[in-house]
Image (tube, coloured by chain):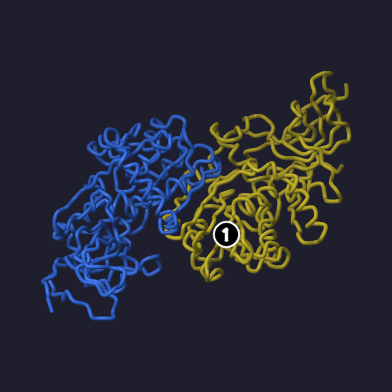
Chain colours: A yellow, B blue
Amino acid sequence: MEEVQNKQVIFRNFITGLPKETDMELRTSKLSLKVAEGCRALIVKNLFLSCDPYMRGRMREFYGSYIPPFQPGAVIEGFGISKVVESDHPNFQVGDIVTGMTGWEEYSLIEKPDRLRKIDPRGLPLSYYLGLLGMPGFTAYAGFYEVCSPQKGEFAFVSAASGAVGQLVGQLAKLHGCYVVGSAGSKEKVDLLKNKFGFDEAFNYKVESDLNAALRRYFPQGIDIYFDNVGGTMLDAALLNMRDHGRIAICGMISQQSLSSTEGVYNLYSVIMRRVKVQGFLQSDYLHLYPQFTEAIINYFKEGKIVYVEDMNEGLESGPSAFVRLFSGKNVGKQVVRVAHE
Amino acid sequence: MEEVQNKQVIFRNFITGLPKETDMELRTSKLSLKVAEGCRALIVKNLFLSCDPYMRGRMREFYGSYIPPFQPGAVIEGFGISKVVESDHPNFQVGDIVTGMTGWEEYSLIEKPDRLRKIDPRGLPLSYYLGLLGMPGFTAYAGFYEVCSPQKGEFAFVSAASGAVGQLVGQLAKLHGCYVVGSAGSKEKVDLLKNKFGFDEAFNYKVESDLNAALRRYFPQGIDIYFDNVGGTMLDAALLNMRDHGRIAICGMISQQSLSSTEGVYNLYSVIMRRVKVQGFLQSDYLHLYPQFTEAIINYFKEGKIVYVEDMNEGLESGPSAFVRLFSGKNVGKQVVRVAHE
């Protein structure tokens, strides 16, 4: 029975504030690359791992969410792209490329592979199936079309706009005929928004002393659609700048994830005067749209109508720092860890 | 030319905190009961005046709202029931009973009567056309059916539940087959909710030290529909108790109207996990439903399926105190001022 040394990233213990690299540690254990007959399990070799803000929620000891917390002492879980190296499941063959929940480790035993999806990359980089064509991209697609009910000519604002979700929201909004402004946290990201993703305008929220004034400047006629990836003070400022019958899609609230007590939102009263809809959503409610999403995005990409930027980190060892950088906004684009070349 | 002494309630000046009686003053001026030929104006004798929370918004010097502020030194305006005593307008005859915007005074000159509506009371008390069959009743009707998208068997929560809007929301929700709980600010109001309006449960929010715990107690399975008349801490507590795909209709936020800086709402992040829709609305967006509203409510009332409670105040002089009592919650039911018997 072949056995390998398996490097892993372990979750140490529940946290309250911002995630730190020391909340995770590297460990090496042994893993047999064989599975018992009849168990329907797989062994996969992990190629890419996804760093996503929602994972912060799994670092709290809170059991009321749609997904349970990580277990202290166990391997971190997340979305990944993996290659099947052993299979006792009729739907999966050795060599298949799959995506779904896996472990932050070189090899993972997948006991219940039914929720994995096989990937035919169709000429796109494999790692894009964690971002543009994965959960973040689908969040952008479902949130923009299903929650924001966009109309041509409307004024759209996207926060965390260069992130895994925001960059696609902005490009879809442009393709839909909206006027699009994005906010991000550095000059480099603002340049990216304007010059690579084709946003009409973009600003660095960190240099704005008054977010309300900034939004008034970029949206003198007000905002029809706010795709909110951050919550907090940016949401408060947007609430003051919405147009009649505006829509706010609440998606991530990354600014609030690490606060032990969240910031208040003070301007909700303005939803009355402006008849604004504030809608929280999870992409998992829209999975019936996944096939049309994949087709649409692959076509747009091949036609050169959308682009995607990744922040690629090399090696499993880079996982903890890559994850932590999400929360300081140091990543530029979709944060991915490459564990192995195919 | 007949001239009368016309008692009036004058708005003194813009305010920042809670309205006080001294923000208004009584004055008597003279009014001719004749209008010039060709001016299409009316003179009306005011019978009932309505005290509504939105009027607080007109006491601020803020011009960005859907309705302009009151003018310091001028008569307070509001919804009223009036009798036409002089008319140069082809649609109105002396003796007609009308409702719409009028002045807080014994007689009003209505220069542009086109927005007044003639009333056939159809056996209901005239004053009900300010509450049950007026703007507050229509707010309840449009908000419940159009914004809350109610389903039979759902769990509905109404705050300020004995007020002009809340009492009808709760009764409509019961008629729709919902389980309905109301909150109010006194034992007397709680008794009214349970014994007169037929709410399944009701509680006095002033004796609850933990509103989140109170809602968990009354809604162990969570809330599908929250009809929010108050905002602030009650909204925050409700956000923690919503069920998946819950809906929150934001209507009044009376608790926030008098705060120079509003309280924060801290639990908005829960709209993501629970996929909650928070929708601000104004009844004026639904005026096409007014005829069906009137028919439905009059029928329910005549069949004994709904009741309505008013807090009737006698005499124009009682106007300032009646208005101020809205904001301390001292009124029980729809706050109305009777200016004259017909």
Check disc 1 and report the residue beneath it: A225
Could you tell whether A269 is left or right of A118 in the image? left
Q: Can residue B317 be seen in this view?
A: yes
Q: Residue B24 location in percent, x, y?
A: 19, 64
What residue is shown at x 83% (from left), y 30% (from top)? A91
Crowd class of label 1 (few under 14; some 14 to 19; many from 20; radius 10 Å): many
In the rendered view, tell whether residue A99 sits above or below residue A138.
above
Classify residue A323 by image quadrant: top right
Could you tell whether B77 is left or right of A166 in the image? left
Q: Is mark 1 on a helix, strand or loop?
A: strand
What residue is shown at x 23% (from left), y 47% (from top)? B310
Q: Can residue B12 be seen in this view?
A: no
In the rendered view, tell whether residue A130 sits above or below residue B79.
above
Q: Of residues A9 and A307, which is closer to you in this image?
A: A307
Q: Residue A122 location in percent, x, y?
A: 86, 48
Q: Label 1 sits on what residue type?
A: Ile
What residue is shown at x 40% (from left), y 55% (from top)? B283
In the rendered view, tell whether residue A47 sits above or below residue B153.
below
Q: Of residues A211 and B208, which is closer to you in this image?
A: B208
Could you tell whether B11 is left or right of A131 in the image? left
Image quarter (top left, top right, bottom left or bottom right) of the C terminus of chain B? bottom left
Q: Residue A229 location in percent, x, y?
A: 59, 52
In the rendered view, tell whether residue A341 sits above or below residue B52.
above
What residue is shown at x 40% (from left), y 65% (from top)? B66
| Chain letter for the residue marked with disc 1 in the picture | A
Image quarter (top left, top right, bottom left or bottom right) of the N terminus of chain B? bottom left
Q: Residue B281 location in percent, x, y?
A: 44, 54
